[in-house]
Amino acid sequence: MAFLTARGLDKTYVAGGRQLTILRGVDLDVEKGEMVAIVGASGVGKSTLLHVLGGLDRIDAGSVTISDANITALPDAEVVAFRNRQVGFVFQFHHLLPEFSALENVEMPMRIARMGAEKTRAQAEALLARVGLSERATHRPGMLSGGEQQRIAVARALVMRPALLLADEPTGNLDEQTGESLHALLREMHRSYDLTSVIVTHNPRLAAACDRVLRLEGGRLVAADSGTAAR
């Protein structure tokens, strides 16, 4: 059985009195240790799919299983606890808390899990070092560049040592050079942290660096050539 399995995912929104179907019976299998890219046109539902896979959004029908946990069958409180322990998220916009330092932002998932202060500090400092930002530990997000903020977001996503990393356009708000640097960081972290990763991207180079590329179109996933990722 695959590490991440989705079966028959349906998702419909109501907007302006009309029903908009985003996902139509989506099936997905991601093996442990695999890095999969999801591409597609803007507005087709890539972010919705990622949110459903990570338990940030509920589906209308279908199931999502991560390892041996069917998260679609869990109560909301248990989904939140599972997500905090097992799933790391990186978004296009970093969503760092502006009133906290870089170090405190990285610590936040462990604080939510009520881990001991000494352990949280040590783990957060280690992650900051891994992403090359130890000297920025006391800086608040507003004092950091876009690339630095996104590196902090990567560190925060991995501080709980999750098994699954979900990244939604992680380089979409960065210039080309900074984006390439973040690509390299994501690939390094994927390998060294033994992650299973699903990355939504418009960037053809990031997609091409993944093990597989899938395209979301018409509410379903189909195999895609990485060379078409930007279209």
Image (tube, grey):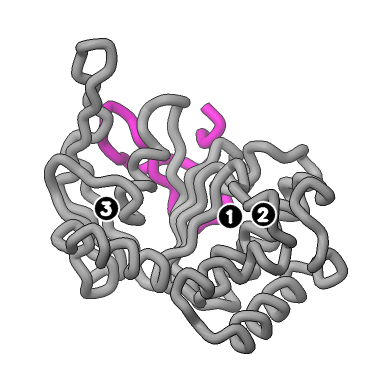
Front residue of 172/14: it is 14
Of label 2 and label 3, which has the lower sequence position?
3
Front residue of 104/62: it is 104
Residue drawn at (24%, 58%) of the image: 76
Q: Are marks 3 and 1 in contact (CB under 8 Å)?
A: no
Q: Are marks 2 and 3 in contact (CB under 8 Å)?
A: no
Q: Is residue 130 left or right of residue 205?
A: right
Of label 1 and label 2, which has the lower sequence position?
2
Give percent across and percent down for residue 18: 20, 13
Q: Which quadrant of the figure has residue 181?
A: bottom right
Q: Which residues are magenta?
A: 207-231
Which circle marks residue 76 in the picture? none
Residue at mark 1? 209
> Is 45 above or below relative to 184?
above
* Disc 1, SS: loop
Give percent across and percent down for residue 29: 28, 59
Residue at mark 3? 28
Residue 35 visible at all: no
Q: Are marks 1 and 2 in contact (CB under 8 Å)?
A: yes
Kindly report which numbered mark, 3 or 1, lies closer to the viewer in this rendering.
3
Residue drawn at (43%, 67%) of the image: 196
Residue drawn at (33%, 30%) of the image: 217
* Disc 2, SS: helix
Q: Which quadrant of the figure has residue 148?
A: bottom right
Q: Amino acid at mark 3?
A: Leu
Q: Amino acid at mark 2?
A: His
Front residue of 175/206: it is 175
Q: Amino acid at mark 1?
A: Ala
